[in-house]
Every structure is written in C-alpha cells, then in structure tokens.
Image (spheres, rainbow, N blue to C red):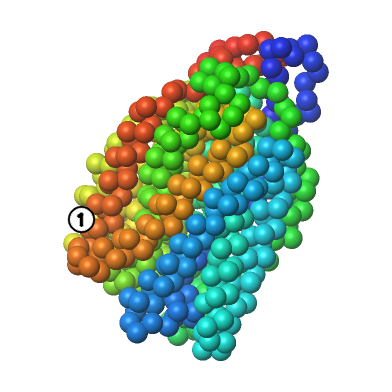
Amino acid sequence: MVELAASASSSQSNAPAPAAISPRQVTAAVVGNALEFYDFTTYAYFAVQIGHAFFPGRSAFESLMLSLATFGAGFFSRPIGAVVIGSLADRVGRRPAMLLSFTLMGLAILGLALTPSYRQIGLAAPLLALSFRLLQGFALGGEVGPTTAFLIEAAPPQRRGLYGAWQGASQGVATLLGGLIGVGLSTHLNPHDLDAWGWRIAFLIGALVLPFGLIIRRNLPETRHRDEAVHAAHPNAPTLRGHLRIILLGLAMVGSFTTATYVFQYMTTYASTTLHMQMGVAFGATVISGAVGLVFTLLGGALSDRFGRKAMVLIPRTLFLLATLPAFLLMVHRHDAITLLGGVGLMGALSSVSSGPGLILLTESVRKEVRGLVLSTVYAVALAVFGGTTQMVITALIHLTGDPLAPAWYMMAATAIGIAAVSLMRETAHYPKIAPDGETVSPRAMR
C-alpha cells in the first residue's frame, strides 16, 4: 500500500516528517464528498416528479419551472456556506469542516424526502422544500473547499493531480449512482407511482448512508498544519486581496465547467420532455454521464501530473467545444437511445478529462492559509451564478424559441469563456516542491 507522505517546507527540512496519510483515509474523504453531491444533485434527476409533488402549476411547463427554481435556490445559499465553513476549515481544520457540512446535508436530504406533498399540507410543502434546499446549498457550499484542500495536502507532491482529481471523480460517482437508482425506479415502478412516491426512495437512500459517512470522516487526520512549499505564483500573498486575479479567473473557469455539468444533469429532463424518450432511456444518459465522469476525471488528473494542468484543460476543452453542436444535432434528429447515450458519453468524457486538472490548477494557485475559504467561495459563487440558473435558462430558451439546440448554444458560449480564463492562468504542476526527505525537487525529477 502506497502511503501519502506530507510535504515539508525547505526551512524545516530537518524536522521529522508528519505521519503518513493512507489511501484508505483519502478514500474516506472522497466517499463523503460523493455522498454529499449525490444528495444535492438527485433533485435534478427528479425535477419533474418534485414539481408535481410540491409545485402544482397550471401547466407542465410552469410546474417544472417552479421545481427548477427551487433547485436553483440551493445554489444561492452555497456562497454563505462557503464563507462560513470554508473559514472554519482554515481556522480550525479540514476535518471539522467536512464533518459539519456532511451532517447538515444529511439533515436536509432527510427533511426533503419526508416533506408531505402540496395536496396534503398546502403552501407549507413548497416552503419546506425550499428551506431544505437552501440548507443543502449551505452544506455543499462548504464541502468543496475543505475536501479539495485535504486531498491536495494529503497527496505526495508528484501525484497531486491524480489525488486532487478524486474531487471531480467523486461527483461522477454521485451522478452514476443517481442515474442507476433512477433507472431502477423507473423500470420497476409505473409512472404514477414514480410520480407519487417513488422519487422519495432516491432521497431516503442518501439519508441512510449518513451514519456511515460520519463514522468514516471522524477518523480522518488533519492536514491543515502540514507544511508545504510556497508556489511561485503567490509567494507573498496570504490574503484574499493577493489572490484577486486568480479568484476572477477561477470564477470564469469554474463557471464554464459548472454550466457543462448542469447541462449534463439536465439531460434526463431534456430527453424526456424535449426528445420525448422513455424515462428508462432518459436516466441512462445520467448513468453514462456519471461513468465517464468517474473514469475520465481521474485520467485527466493523472495525465496532468505528467503533461501539466493547463495542457490537460485547454486541449480537451477545445475539442469539447467543437464536438458539442454536432452531438446535439444528432440527438435531436435521430431521437434514439444509442445516439443520446453516445453523444452524452463523448461530451462527458471531453468535459471530465479537463475539469479535474482545472480544479487542481486553481487549488495549487492558492496559498494554504486561505485555501479553504478561496476554493469554497470561488466554487460556490460560480455555481450560484451558473449552476443555479443553467437548467432554468435552457428550459426557458427551449420553450420560448422552440429550438431544441438551445442547451448546445448555451454550453458552447460558457466553454469559450472558460478556455479564455484558463489560457491566462499560470502553470502550477511543475513548480518546485518538497520531497519527503526535505530536498527541493521538481515533480518530473521525482518520477
């Protein structure tokens, strides 16, 4: 078993090395992160059913839009959670921050699963759904920064790309699980039962794993005090003001990634409401998206250790930009399962292989003293602006214009902005780092 030795700064090269962090402990952080994202994103997969339960409108479009608006509300509480829990991670530690966010997420998902429908309790139903959704957003807003910081700080210097990529890969795991559960429920339940109560099963499954997640996270070591080399990008910038440039570029980059992610998560709704395909096939798009997200995010992270973070963002992202319109054209014109799953798989692979290195690039560009706060805030704000609005915007665009290619145009515009932002960022993969014995070497030399 490979152990993850912590970095030691050059000024402390003679100090004893801190205790090693095992892959099992890193896995515990990743599993907890995956569970949180499963709880948060499962809402998107059952947006139609949740709309019927809590937001009965005068039309199917109105009900779906109200449901998606509540889905988006969870993103607007994420910046608050990012500041509160991200600051806690920098002041107290990564572990207590991760425990807090996980506990709050568990309470929110349980509450949402057990909230009675509008027919049973009237206006209280949508108000409760909105409240629990806001709590979900607060919890997840504080999850990304501490978990990503932990993974980067726990990894050996020459493998930070691979270990950091587990942040994005864990989201792929969440998407995959959500899609598989959706396929199972839509296969074994008739549309009426799925609409009436079947969607709640998916949320209850997420709530059931809460105790196990708390147990594995309680045993995590703390990485906040581990020494590491100062990157040349910000040698004297321990404050937020010193990171203003990377914060702005990070917002544009993460916003681009987020738009693509939530277009993919919309594909279940898109396939059923726009392409008029069966729910089992529609959920299959989510399964494919999650599977390629898991595999290709890790592949991108590993390759970024060898070829650099920027190259592994810019090249795949450019190919993704070029592939988006042809993929949607084929899906719209063919309306069959193979084209839908193939198009989602191709776009998801190109998007995922670049998103992992992008998040690592941002993490390595930020000094440790403010890493939890900066990462949480950048991620949460980007998701509030783009993730919280993407599905509503493309639903409205399809409805108003009648153009089923609206998701493609929207995603391509965001992708172009992200490519421009990354091109202005500095490479971080090959900055000098500290070997376990205290000697300063480059990652290339440590291979």
Query: Can you identify the residue that label 1 sits on?
Result: 329
The quadrant in which the C terminus is found is top right
Asked whether residue 158 appears in the rendered view, the answer is no
SS for callout 1: helix
Farthest front residue in view: 241
Dot 1 crowding, Cα within 10 Å, few <14, some 14–19, many 20+: some
Q: Position of residue 432 (x, y in %)?
A: 56, 15
Q: Is residue 5 above or below residue 347?
A: above
Q: Residue at x 34, y 53 (%)?
A: 344
Q: Is residue 28 left or right of residue 268?
A: right
Quadrant of the image occupied by residue 226? top right
Which of the two residues, 364 or 221, is positioned nearer the viewer here? 364
Q: Is residue 229 above or below residue 272?
A: above
Q: Residue at x 71, y 33 (%)?
A: 224
Q: Position of residue 246 (x, y in %)?
A: 46, 31
Farthest right residue in view: 16
Q: Residue at x 38, y 44 (%)?
A: 256
Q: Is residue 284 left or right of residue 101?
A: left
Give the number of marks.
1
The quadrant in which the N terminus is found is top right
Q: Residue at x 36, y 42 (%)?
A: 350
Which of the two residues, 401 or 332, is positioned nearer the viewer here? 401
Quadrant of the image occupied by residue 52? bottom left
Q: Is residue 223 left or right of residue 303?
A: right
Q: Amino acid at mark 1?
A: Leu
Q: Position of residue 272 (x, y in %)?
A: 34, 70
Q: Position of residue 29 (x, y in %)?
A: 66, 45
Asked whether residue 366 appears in the rendered view, the answer is yes
